[in-house]
Image (spheres, helix red, strand yellow):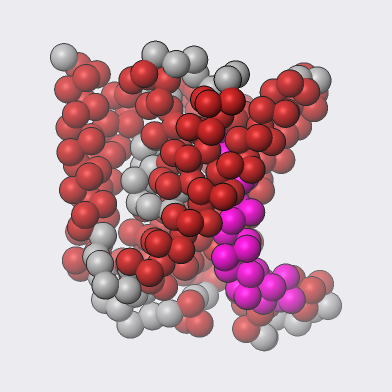
């Protein structure tokens, strides 16, 4: 694949991963609307891994806390703040891992990669995000995150396996409905992306190794590196904007794009 195409994928992923507008949906739309060759799910996951590195770097304090909590869990301690954070991340990841395994094993993940599906999910879940953002209170923070809330947001996250839903958008929706503030809901969403991307990266990484496609592996590494750089900048901007801006601009974008895609799909 041309380097330009790889860089374009990386930029799209880096900009859209942390906005509630579906990075995977945009990656699927790239070949569908431009005529470029479909990059496939391996490169999709590669650029997600690049953004994973960006999340770890940006939220290094919280990641360090979760790692400390993991060590405490292994020692049988569950009554500390780091341990509760680690438990919540693990519990919140279970639904998407189970659902992802089923979709990957049955091939349904490939069948849903269409403009019509993305159009409907962009539109519907954009409206749901607006409703949750307007209805939700802003009384809870990351310190209030419990394993019960993690399960709820984890179930929302599993829905994001449908292209166009937006993993960040749907988990922020779940967080806002539970009463987390905008910035706090986004912070939880970003932290939950870490084990989720790791799980998908392991599955598709195993596919690369089993197929022995090392050219594809090189392309994946290039795309991941550029995605990481773009994501760091986008993440910095996203978290600053959330202090003063609601999610309404993203909702408007989703609704307009969804309507356009449905027109393209059915016209």
Rendered view: 122 above or below 137: above
Rendered view: 105 above or below 36: below
Q: Residue at x 43, y 47 (%)?
A: 15
Residue ranking furthest to the right: 75
Image quadrant assignment for residue 111: top left
Q: Residue at x 62, y 29 (%)?
A: 42
Indicate left or right for 180 with 229 as reference. left
Q: Position of residue 116 (x, y in %)?
A: 29, 24
State the quadrant of the C terminus. top left
Is residue 58 part of the magenta span, yes or no?
Answer: yes
Q: Position of residue 166 (x, y in %)?
A: 39, 45
Task: Confirm whether residue 104 shows in the render.
Answer: no
Image quadrant assignment for residue 103: top right
Q: Position of residue 142 (x, y in %)?
A: 48, 77
In the image, 95 versus 116, the foreground residue is: 116
Is most of the magenta stretch helix, strand or loop? helix
In the image, 81 versus 57, the foreground residue is: 57
Rendered view: 172 above or below 126: below
Q: Residue at x 57, y 59 (%)?
A: 55
Q: From which residue to which does the magenta span run?
A: 44-69
Number of numbered discs overlaid on the protein picture: 0
Q: Residue at x 73, y 21 (%)?
A: 215
Residue ranking furthest to the front: 4
Q: Position of residue 83 (x, y in %)?
A: 68, 77
Is residue 41 part of the magenta span, yes or no?
Answer: no
State the quadrant of the N terminus. top right
Task: Confirm whether residue 174 shows in the render.
Answer: yes
Indicate left or right for 149 with 64 as reference. left
Indicate left or right for 186 with 95 as reference. left
């Amino acid at each position: 694949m041309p380097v330009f195409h790889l860089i374009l994928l990386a930029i799209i992923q880096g900009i859209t991963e942390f906005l509630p507008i579906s990075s995977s949906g945009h990656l699927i739309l790239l070949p569908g609307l431009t005529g470029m060759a479909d990059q496939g799910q391996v490169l999709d996951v590669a650029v997600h891994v690049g953004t994973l590195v960006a999340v770890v770097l940006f939220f290094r304090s919280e990641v360090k806390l979760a790692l400390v909590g993991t060590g405490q869990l292994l020692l049988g301690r569950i009554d500390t703040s780091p341990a509760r954070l680690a438990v919540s991340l693990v519990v919140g990841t279970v639904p998407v891992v189970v659902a992802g395994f089923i979709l990957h094993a049955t091939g349904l993940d490939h069948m849903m990669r269409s403009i019509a599906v993305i159009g409907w999910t962009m539109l519907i879940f954009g409206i749901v995000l607006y409703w949750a953002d307007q209805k939700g209170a802003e009384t809870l923070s990351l310190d209030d995150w419990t394993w019960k809330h993690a399960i709820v947001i984890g179930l929302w996250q599993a829905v994001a396996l449908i292209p166009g839903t937006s993993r960040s958008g749907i988990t922020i929706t779940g967080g806002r409905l539970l009463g987390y503030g905008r910035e706090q809901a986004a912070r939880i969403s970003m932290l939950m992306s870490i084990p989720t991307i790791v799980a998908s990266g392991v599955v598709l990484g195993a596919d690369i190794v089993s197929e022995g496609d090392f050219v594809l592996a090189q392309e994946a590494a290039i795309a991941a590196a550029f995605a990481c750089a773009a994501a760091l900048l986008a993440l910095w901007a996203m978290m600053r904007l959330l202090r003063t801006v609601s999610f309404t601009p993203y909702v408007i974008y989703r609704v307009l794009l969804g309507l356009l895609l449905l027109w393209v799909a059915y016209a």
